[in-house]
Amino acid sequence: MEQNQIGKLIIVSGPSGAGKGTICAELMRQMPDLVMSCSATTRAPRPNERKDRSYFFVSTETFLEMVRKDELLEYDQHFENYYGTPKKFVVDMLNFGKDVILEIDVKGALQVKQNYPDSILFFIEAPSEEALYERLIKRGSETEEKIQIRMARNKLELAQRYKYDYCIMNDDVDRAVAEIIAILKERRK
Ligand code: 5GP
């Protein structure tokens, strides 16, 4: 890990269904100088997802090869699938002076913070368990059983939020994004 990087890592993390994706898209729209990292995953693409944009969709064999070659900044297993952040792109961008957003789960976020203590960690919280459940249902991509597994994991993730630099309540996307932007601008001073 190169500690002399100029840019900062911005980690947007928290339970699945809390609205991290929407928040990141809006952050990128309002702060076009930010760069978004694209994760690798072994999960199958959802109908609305774009190859090499939403994720690099890879086989388990390829993913484990990336792990073996130390090509990932962090990785985690989530619902039978692997997810990880390709290291080279992120390190290159940081050294180039860019701030890079990672949208990752809680375990990954805490791994990154350990290696890059300068990272800024945002925990995105849904207003209630019911709201989280509603969002996962609306997504329409998961069976009830998988949603229940995600909800159980969400509880464990929620218990880790005190380890984050900032908790952002996503009861209103515009307000949540404005809060993050204000923090980032303050941190850049
Ligand atoms: P989904 O299957 O809904 O796209 O993602 C499941 C979970 O994996 C989400 O919480 C998402 O933020 C997380 N995730 C996505 N990419 C990465 C990554 O590169 N590393 C880690 N640790 N988690 C990730």
Image (spheres, rainbow, N blue to C red):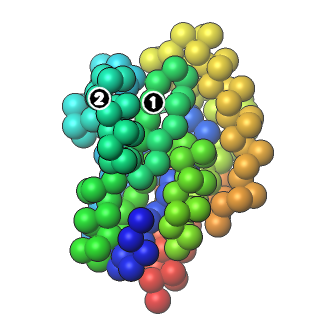
Q: Nearer the viewer, residue 107 or 152?
A: 107
Indicate the amino acid at tag 2. Answer: Thr
Q: Position of residue 41 (x, y in %)?
A: 37, 31
Q: Position of residue 14 (x, y in %)?
A: 60, 45
Q: Position of residue 142 (x, y in %)?
A: 50, 15
How crowded pointer 1 is (Cα within 10 Å; few <14, some 14-19, many 20+) is rated as some
Indicate the amino acid at tag 1. Answer: Tyr
Note whether residue 30 is visible: no
Q: Is residue 170 above or below residue 189?
A: above
- How many marks do you count on the picture? 2
How crowded pointer 2 is (Cα within 10 Å; few <14, some 14-19, many 20+) is rated as some
Residue at 61% over, 39% down: 15
Residue 35 is labelled as: none
* Ligand 1 closer than 8 Å to label 2 CB: no
**Residue 48 falls left or right of residue 133:** left
Q: Is residue 138 above or below residue 161?
A: above
Note whether residue 115 is visible: yes
Q: Nearer the viewer, residue 12 or 85?
A: 85
Q: Nearer the viewer, residue 29 or 110?
A: 110
Label 1 vs 2, first from the N-terminus: 2
**Residue 51 falls left or right of residue 103:** left
User: In the rendered image, which residue does mark 1 sit on?
Assistant: 82
Q: Which of label 1 and label 2 is nearer to you?
A: 2
User: In the rendered image, which residue does mark 2 sit on?
Assistant: 62
Residue at 71% over, 26% down: 152
Residue at 56% over, 53% down: 111
Q: Position of residue 69 (x, y in %)?
A: 32, 43
Residue at 52% over, 57% down: 112
* Ligand 1 closer than 8 Å to label 1 CB: no
Give the secondary structure at mark 1. strand
